[in-house]
Structures are given as structure tokens and as C-alpha cells.
Amino acid sequence: MEEKRYRDLARFFRQQFGERVQKLSLDGGFSCPNRDGAKGRGGCTYCNNESFNPAYCREAGSITAQLQEGVRFFGAKYKGQRYLAYFQAYSNTYAPLEVLKARYEEALAFPGVVGLVIATRPDAVTGEILDYIATLAKERYVCIEYGVESVNEEVLRSIRRGHTYQEAEQAICLTAERGIYTGAHLIFGLPGETPESMLEGVSTLTRLPLHVLKLHQLQIIAGTPMAEVWREHPEQFRLYTEEEYLDFIVQVIERIHPDLYLERFVNQAPADWLLAPKWGAKNHEFTAKVEKRLREADSWQGKFFSSFLACSD
């Protein structure tokens, strides 16, 4: 089999654990400072957690019960794998430390769980929380995944994100310097972005000490403030076709740090929630097209990457 032209996170997991590893999504019962009034109410304009939170997370109850349901589902598809407990819904460091300890340690005690992935916001971590997570990271795989979404401050304000890019940069540096695997998430196609600004942004972001990068196209999801604006003013949006996005992702891969692991390029909202764009392509199908396009262009990850930017004191 031909070597991939980008660093695939699944390959890292196979090297790290010697077998397939599956992420199991969890709802830890947390809130978000952009929903409870600390920063805002109603959340980011594009966000509807119901569109990506698996049904078993809402129905199963406890962390242990959710893990049992997740293992029951994936265990029937893949035999002999291990699991990462993925705290996905809302902001999963946004609680008192004792609450976080109870949730994380319950997940780590579950048979077959080899680590944690903790999705959160850059403004929802403290030094005390990071110090605790660093103790877990000495024994298990632990990755904190920050929703950065855009490097453009004006865009962040327009989507009511409630934090700045500077806060994202600071959180990434503070996390990485504690020896915790650090991830970032970007959305491509937000109103106010251009292809040039997004390429410049991803180049800026990936100069930071990141381990994992997750990418996906903007999707208009039912039940969000953005969906209302899209219906009334579709001219404000530049939604990619699948072919356009494929070409753009190749340019992204060429500009990111060559040591960074890529987890995904696209997202698939359930058909009942997705308003636009409706591509119909599954993740593995799009990934195969990316690999083919990179080979055709004789390109690879980091081909046009510039220098590494260290965190400032």
C-alpha cells in the first residue's frame, strides 16, 4: 500500500497502541460559558449540539452507561479494539475541578478505555485544571481539543464565539507545555472568511505546538441562528461544492506543519439536521479523494510550510 502523503491520526494510534482505537462520544453533563450567561446565551451562531451528539449519550445517563452503549455499538463492527473516552458535548473543562475529576476518572476506569479526548473552549480552562489533566497524561493518552474555529477576530465576533484567537493561542501553549497532547478544530467557510484568509490562518495556527488538527466545512444546521440568516440572506454565504472544498483542502495540507496529525477533513451532520451544503460523501470517501488529489499533484503535507513559531513567555 502506498504511503499516505499526510500524517493520519489513525496511524499514530496504531503505532501508539498496536491496534485500532475507537473514540466513544460522551455527554458529561457540562454547559458552556456561551450558553449559561457567563459569556452569552444561545451559543455560537452555527452550533446545535443535538446534530452531532449520538442518541446513546442523551439516553444512557451516566458516563459508564454511555460507554457501555458505545462499546455495544462499535464492538459489533470491530473486534478486539480499544477505546478513547471522548468528552464531546459542550465545554468539557467547564466545571469545578472535583466534578471534572469524577467524570474523567469514571471514564478511565472503564474496561478497554486507554485514554481521554476532551473537547473544550480556550476560555474554559485554568492552570489548576491543566495541572490536574497533566497528571492523567503521565499515565494515559490525553488530548485536549480546542475549538478555535477561526484565526480571524472579526469572524469570531460575528459568530458569537465569545473568545479571541489570542486566548486560543495562549490555551494551546499552556496545555502543550504541560506535556498534554493538544488539538485544534477549524471550520472553513464561515461568513467573512476568504480562501486567502483561511490559508493564512491555518498556517498561523499550525506554527503552534499542536499534535492534532480537525477540519471541516461550514454546514448550515437546522435550529441555529446561522440557519435563520442563511434563509434570509444566502448571498452572505460562500458554501463550497465538494470539488471546490477538495481543492482547498489540498492547499491546506500543503501549508500545515509536517509533524501535525490530521484527524478529519469533513463533517457529516445527520440528514435531518443538515440544510446545506448536501454533498452526500462519507468521510472515508472524501479522504480517498484527498489522497488521490495529492498524488496527482505530487504534493504532500507541509510542502509550503514556513517556520515554526514558538510560544512566547
Image (spheres, grey):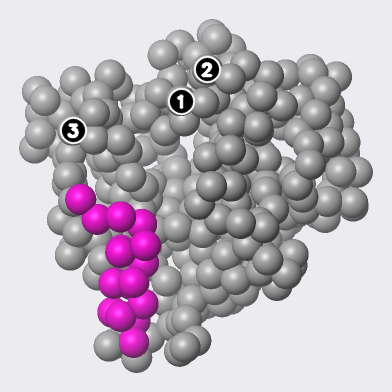
Return the residue at label 2. Answer: 59
User: Please, is residue 171 above or below residue 28 in the view?
Assistant: below
Q: Position of residue 80 (x, y in %)?
A: 67, 58
* Residue 131: mark: none
Q: Which residues are magenta?
A: 280-295
Residue plotted at (78% across, 36% down) = 110
Q: Position of residue 182 (x, y in %)?
A: 68, 52
Dot 3 crowding, Cα within 10 Å, few <14, some 14–19, many 20+: some
Residue plotted at (36% across, 47% down) = 267
Q: CA distance from mark 1 to mark 3?
A: 20 Å
Asked whether residue 275 appears in the rendered view, the answer is yes
Task: Label 3, secondary structure: give it.
Answer: strand
Residue 228 horizontal side relative to residue 167, left or right: left
The disc, 1 or 3, on the residue closer to the chain's N-terminal end is: 1
Disc 2 + disc 3, Cβ < 8 Å: no
Disc 2 + disc 1, Cβ < 8 Å: yes
User: Please, is residue 85 above or below residue 288 in the view?
Assistant: above
Dot 1 crowding, Cα within 10 Å, few <14, some 14–19, many 20+: few
Dot 2 crowding, Cα within 10 Å, few <14, some 14–19, many 20+: few
Residue plotted at (45% across, 58% down) = 264
Q: Amino acid at mark 2?
A: Glu
Tell me how many marks there are.
3
* Residue 55: mark: 1
Residue 105 horizontal side relative to residue 19, left or right: right
Residue plotted at (17% across, 45% down) = 278
Q: Quadrant of residue 276?
A: top left
Task: Label 2, secondary structure: give it.
Answer: helix
Return the residue at label 3. Answer: 275
In the image shown, does 114 or 200 lie closer to the viewer? 114
Task: Label 1, secondary structure: give it.
Answer: helix
Q: Amino acid at mark 3?
A: Leu
The disc, 2 or 3, on the residue closer to the chain's N-terminal end is: 2
